[in-house]
Amino acid sequence: MAKLKALLIGGTGYGGAELLRRLLFHPQVEVARVTAVDNVGKALGDVHFNLAGLSSLRFEQVPAAEAAKGVDVVFLALPHKTTAKVVLELLDSGYGGRIVDMSGDFRLRDPKAYETFYGVAHPRPAMLETGAFAYGLPELNRAALKGAKYVASPGCFATTIALGLAPLAKAGLLTGPVHTVAATGSSGSGANPVIGTHHPLRASNLRTYKPLEHQHVPEIQQTLGAVGAKDFSLEFVPVSAPLPRGIFATTFVDVPASTTQEALTQAWAKTFEGERFVRIVRGDRQPEVVAVSGGNYVEVGFSLGPVTGATRRVVCFSALDNLVKGGAGQAVQAFNAMMGFDEGLTLAEPGLWP
């Protein structure tokens, strides 16, 4: 079987680097072209030092419609709002191949929510309303990915929090407002340094940003609503943490007082049965970033509190690498599912330890 020819648009960022690290070794893919608006003409390894000597490709600055000629799949590693314009350029030019998008431009189904959280009206709202892009979270949306033409890969916070809460949603226990605090590494802010990612300010600091208004909130609510959450709303506070990679989420949920440890253990086991990239952590240890950094795995777990009146508190924990399972690795996993490949192609190796 001939390899699929792939185009990567936006290859100089951290997401692009991680995509290339996976796709250059994918047995079913040939990376045919990589485009960008910066570092044009440079070899891949001159920008992403870990890729030195692995490819003869160079970054090109070519219009998307022209670059996509003759390729089977386009991977987009661009910022939101920019991505939607590029997708429309591809589709309006007659491009007939597949698209895997890592931005937030096609994840939501409600154009009003997109405008509220992304600050602009969507240029093609009907594509949101009709679900033109399948949501690329295989553990919760695998059936829709099989044979899909276009995939919207989930956000990093959205993946972490949604997988951490999915067992409660599926068990009918996720209702009303819940509260999440999630800490993220500096690579989530992109490759170009800004004051929030400058090492002297980040390395020994914790600070919040976009409290209660992060753009992944409607995505999380949409995702969990689709698997059973009822009248669910999320109050989410993201935290900038002093680590390069990783997200750690802690979510507080009130459940009926009759809820037992055994019932929750069964809910977690049932939700993630057979999911190779999800590890349920039990016993004395809870999920942690160092166990998943560099890999496509996510750790999930919970702690059940005492009965207080009619309810008791469940604290849900989840951790992943924001650039892999929270980004490019998940995009490749969704691509594998879309094409009917083994989902673990180029993703099965564990992360780094320590």
Image (tube, rainbow, N blue to C red):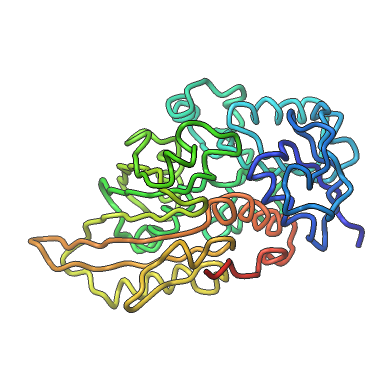
Location of residue 126 (image quadrant): top right
Name the quadrant of the N terminus.
bottom right
Location of residue 83 (image quadrant): top right
Location of residue 191 (image quadrant): top right
Judge by depth and name the residue closer to the eye, 105 or 42: 42
| Total tally of numbered discs in the picture | 0
| Residue for point 37% across, 33% down | 210
| Residue for point 33% across, 43% down | 236
In the image as oriented, which residue stretches furthest toward the left?
A: 309
| Residue for point 67% across, 25% down | 85
Q: Is residue 144 left or right of residue 336?
A: left
Q: Is residue 152 left or right of residue 272?
A: right
Q: Is residue 239 left or right of residue 178?
A: right
The image shows residue 81, relative to residue 329, as above or below, that is above
The image shows residue 129, relative to residue 56, as above or below, that is above
Give residue 107's position: percent from left, percent from top: 55, 39
| Residue for point 36% across, 74% down | 285
Give residue 19's position: percent from left, percent from top: 70, 50
The image shows residue 17, relative to residue 166, as above or below, that is above
In the image as oriented, which residue stretches furthest toward the front?
A: 200
The image shows residue 4, relative to residue 303, as above or below, that is above
Give residue 224's position: percent from left, percent from top: 42, 51
Give residue 171's position: percent from left, percent from top: 35, 64
Judge by depth and name the residue closer to the eye, 273 or 77: 77
